[in-house]
Amino acid sequence: MNSIHEAMGREGLYRPREGRVLGGVCAGLGRRFGLDPWPARLLFILLLMIIPGSQILIYPVLWILMPSD
């Protein structure tokens, strides 16, 4: 599990301590791809409407795997 945390940290995927709403996953993904947290959250919601169910499974997995800042 530590190697996954280290690999995601090297790639710039981490959950920031500031700007979190729930777990910080959308804020971390937004920062990684150069977006503010709110547009990243809106994109996540839009994807949830287009492909229902998949994000409900992906969010908790990323919450567990992404290291905290």
Image: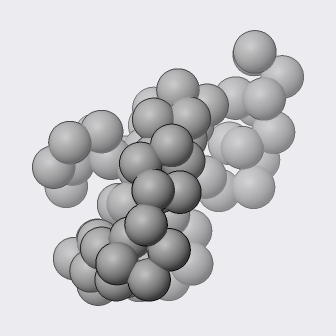
User: Residue 5 falls in which quadrant of the image?
Assistant: top right
Residue 14 appears at what percent x and percent y?
53, 45
Does the image show residue 7?
A: yes
Q: Residue furthest front?
A: 52
Q: Where's the C terminus, which quadrant?
A: top left
Colour logic: one colour
From the top left corner, tell me how far across and down residue 15 is, in percent: 43, 44
Residue at the (44%, 83%) spot, across then down: 50
**Depth check: 57 or 14 in front?**
57
Percent across and percent down for residue 54 are: 53, 57
- Return the residue nearer the eye: 9 or 58: 58
Q: Quadrant of the N terminus?
A: top right
Report the residue at 83% width, 22% height from top. 3
Q: Nearer the viewer, residue 58 or 19?
A: 58
Rendered location of residue 64, percent (x, y)? 52, 26
Up the image or down, 42 lies above or below 24; here it is below
**Residue 29 higher or lower than 69, as above or below:** below
Q: Is residue 48 above or below residue 53?
A: below
Residue drawn at point x = 32 percent, y = 47 percent: 24
Q: Is residue 31 visible?
A: no
In the displayed structure, does residue 55 sit left or right of residue 20?
Answer: right
Q: Is residue 26 above or below residue 7?
A: below
Q: Quadrant of residue 27?
A: bottom left
Asked whether, in this view, residue 7 is left or right of residue 32, the answer is right
Give the total of numbered labels.
0
Report whether 61 appears left or right of 63.
right
